[in-house]
Image (tube, helix red, strand yellow):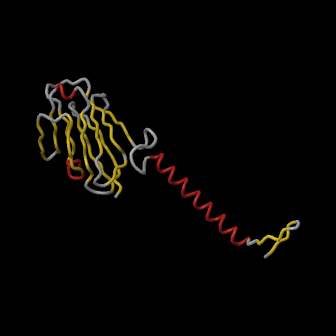
Amino acid sequence: MKKKYQDLEIDEDLELERRTWTIQRIVWGLMLLIILAALLGFTGDGGLPGISKKTKATASQHMTLEYERYLRHQVPSELKVTLQQLQTSEPAIRFSTDFYKEQRVEQVVPEPEKVQVGPEGITYTFSVEQAQSHIIFYVKPLHAGNLSFTAHGPAGEAIAVSQFVYP
């Protein structure tokens, strides 16, 4: 359809313009969703503080755990443990059996004095000097989906951890 505007004849296809506008709005929405996912930490490391990384402590504040809430299958991540006000000569951290069934521990820094696997879980024992700094567990999830385990500190207090692993 030709439309005359003053001395110009202009081709006009209103149906094509409406389809183009609809497609543009859909693409804008998708771009907004991608940006929102990046801010929430779903597209990789980072995200807004407090959303992708979580910190939990025992009631007495003797042990603090810092971990990522969202992981990727077979991609390494860090689990940082801080021990304070130690009341034992050999501080130990025990993880429930779910921990080593669903994740592989690649490395522990500093290296523990001894590691014991039992029916309650896996126990890492450190010297007092080692436990004064952060203890970092480099882990790799073995399965996609929900992952949850419990960490027990030197005083026997527990912290429940829940994570989600993307495929």
Quarter residue 117 falls in: top left
Which corner quadrant holds the N terminus? bottom right
Relative vertical location of residue 90 with respect to residue 158 in this rendering, above or below: above
Residue drawn where x is 28% and y is 40% of the image: 79
> Residue at point 30% right, 36% down?
65
x and y percentages locating residue 72 in the rendered image? 33, 53
Q: Position of residue 4 (x, y in %)?
A: 85, 70
Q: Is residue 7 above or below residue 52?
A: below
Q: Nearer the viewer, residue 157 or 98?
A: 98
Q: Extreme front residue here? A: 7
Left or right of 64 in this view: 27: right
In the current view of this chain or complex, which residue is farthest to the bottom? 1
Q: Please tell me which residue lies in front, 135 or 155.
A: 135
Q: Position of residue 132 (x, y in %)?
A: 23, 26
Question: Splitting the image into 4 quarters, where does residue 58 fall?
Answer: top left
> Left or right of 32: which side holds 22?
right
Q: Is residue 74 depicted above or below 3 in this figure? A: above
Horizontal and vertical percent for residue 116?
11, 41
| Image point (19%, 24%), residue name | 87
**Camera-side residue: 119 or 53?**
53
Q: Residue furthest right?
A: 6
Would you say 112 lies left or right of 85 here?
left
Residue displayed at 16% across by 36% down: 111
Which quarter of the figure is the C terminus placed in?
A: bottom left
Q: Tag count in the figure?
A: 0
